[in-house]
Image: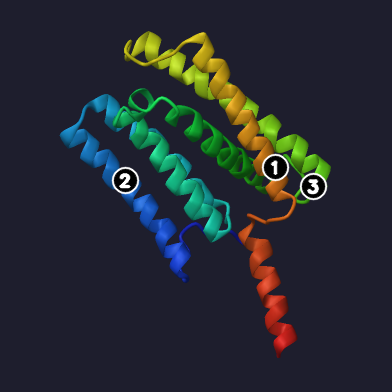
Amino acid sequence: MRHDPLRRAHTATEWMADGVRLLGLVSVLAAAIWWTPTDAGILALALPALLIPRAIAARPGFDLLYGATVTVAAWSNVLDLYRSIAWWDLVVHFAATGLIAAMALLLLQRVGVVPPTLSRRGTVVLVPTIGLAISALWEMVEWLGKTYLAPDIFVTYQDTIGDMAVGGLGSLLTGIVLTRVTIDRSALVAVNKEEETWQI
């Protein structure tokens, strides 16, 4: 199936997922006007992540959940929720890392790095592995930001290890879920076509 990122949305879920992408763009403009250039930059970093699901034909429901989570994670930084709510950082790392790892797996399958179908065991092993790698990269970006851009970014050894641990746990749970749920729009469309044929 050809993956057309410019295809027109057809279902309510697809429209809502595109709405999250539009919200991401508006967020950058709003931050540039009412917040700081650093805040606008943080939100701008989320924009490519929001476009990936359309480019690789992710399932609309997963696209919406992923996009909303990435947007919340970015805005949580701008609104300083990570410091004002003690447990919020762990919740976001748990949810976001797992969803990003799942999206990364689908992307790797699309570009041929990973086979299009994996065994359940392979999925449960690979998704947490990707999630831990993403967690490490995330913490490196935080360190770079604190060191060279904004010294007020909260980075400690305990925070870093805790974030990576809950990110890995979230990815493990996501990997288990993916053994039963597909996030591939192509597979979903194929199933729907088979059902239509059977009904005819």
In this picture, is 146 found above or below 193?
above
Q: Amino acid at mark 3?
A: Leu
- Residue occupied by mark 3: 118
Dot 3 crowding, Cα within 10 Å, few <14, some 14–19, many 20+: few
- Residue occupied by mark 2: 25
- Residue occupied by mark 1: 175
Quadrant the C terminus occupies = bottom right
Q: Residue 3: x and y, percent?
A: 58, 58
Contact, CB < 8 Å: mark 2 with mark 1? Answer: no
Q: Residue 111: x and y, percent?
A: 66, 44
Between marks 2 and 1 in the image, the one whose residue lies nearer the viewer: 1
Q: Residue 63, which numbered label?
A: none
Label 2 vs 1, first from the N-terminus:
2
Q: Residue 161: x and y, percent?
A: 57, 16
Q: Amino acid at mark 2?
A: Leu
Q: CA distance from mark 2 to mark 1?
A: 30 Å
Label 3 vs 1, first from the N-terminus:
3
Residue situated in front as seen by the camera: 157 or 26: 157
Contact, CB < 8 Å: mark 3 with mark 1? Answer: no
Q: Residue at x 36, y 22 (%)?
A: 83
Q: Is residue 34 left or right of residue 88?
A: left
In this picture, is 142 found above or below 94?
above
Q: Amino acid at mark 1?
A: Gly
Q: Residue at x 45, y 13 (%)?
A: 143
Quarter location, residue 57: bottom right
Residue situated in front as seen by the camera: 169 or 130: 169
Q: Residue 199: x and y, percent?
A: 71, 87
